[in-house]
Image (cartoon, helix red, strand yellow):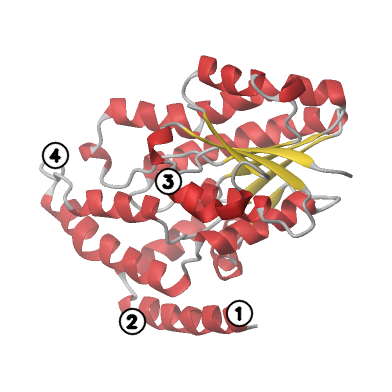
Amino acid sequence: MGTRKVLVTGCSSGIGLALAVRLAKDKLRRFKVVATMRDLDKREALERAAGESLNRSLEIRQLDATCEDSIRECVNSLPNRQVDVLVNNAGVGMIGPLECQNVSAMQELFNTNFFGLVRLVKELLPDMKQRQSGHIVVMSSVLGIQGLLFNDVYAASKFAVEGFCESLAVQAMKFNVKMTLVEPGPVVTEFEKKVYEEAEKMDLSETDEETARIFRQIYLKYSHKVFNSVGQTPEEVAEQSLQVIVSKNPPFRHQTNRLYMPLTAMKHADPTGCLPIDAFYKMIFQHDRMFNASLSILRILHRRMGAA
């Protein structure tokens, strides 16, 4: 197939950084990576991780997914505007009681998580259709399949991403353009760490005492346990994303964490939608011992899978 040009967004840290470096260091030399980020002052970690691949199989460019001009300038700077694989990874997070969230912050989140993807696809899809080839890989989330307590707005943005891609995939297929939604569960990154640090200091005065208690004493505590038990590293997600990219017939959806699959499967098992909501409610509010026991089992399985 030859060397493919891959454009990755959000490469200053986390999954974007790990995937850009993994592709650039591919032993078969199948990729030329354009690793982008909004703020080039944050490029040091990527440069350090890229090592000898920097300015060989990996180049760093500025791209702000919230700005059409920035996207177009980056794409126009590439020879023949060639992008064989787009990896849309740039995103922001938000957790907490809805009453305490600022609507303008919600709009900013959608501007990056959803409209950032729309802008990139709008710019690159016509070229891919004309060439009759291309692969659009979108870093979504299991929260694009199943909502989660206190993740209302973030989950909504990922649901929007999933609906957009599912609708567009049919048209893309007609032009031999592939689309894949990569759906990680918990991933231990600086991105997640920052979101939770901000949540612990969050002003909860706009909500009632019981909701504030549930958020601080139940949700945050359980979230830390979940991340410690089944959280993946960015490198694990990057490795699975690589396998999706090199696949001759990539799936439309790929969940990176098999331990999370039973939770998302509940949604498809009950068309009424009651099963997952009831299960999550009982897990969080009624069966603390069962929740902790389940996490202990998942922790053991996670270690065994890692060793396999």
| Residue annotated with mark 4 | 206
Q: CA distance from mark 3 to mark 2?
A: 44 Å
Q: Visible in this render: residue 271?
A: no
Q: CA distance from mark 4 to mark 2?
A: 31 Å
Q: CA distance from mark 1 to mark 3?
A: 33 Å
Measured along the vertical axis of the image, is residue 264 above or below residue 118?
below
| Residue annotated with mark 2 | 289
Residue found at x 65% / y 45%:
181
Where does residue 207 sit, x and y in percent of width and height?
Answer: 16, 43
Measured along the vertical axis of the image, is residue 290 above or below residue 51?
below
Q: Amino acid at mark 3?
A: Glu
Q: Amino acid at mark 2?
A: Arg
1 and 4 marks in contact (CB < 8 Å): no
Relative to 126, is 265 on the left or the right?
left
**Label 1: which secondary element:** helix
| Residue annotated with mark 3 | 44
Relative to 1, is 31 on the left or the right?
left
Return the disc, 3 or 2, that comes first in the chain's sequence: 3
Where does residue 96 sit, x and y in percent of width and height?
Answer: 27, 47
Q: Amino acid at mark 1?
A: Met
Q: CA distance from mark 3 to mark 4?
A: 39 Å
**Label 2: which secondary element:** helix
| Residue annotated with mark 1 | 305
Residue found at x 86% / y 33%:
176
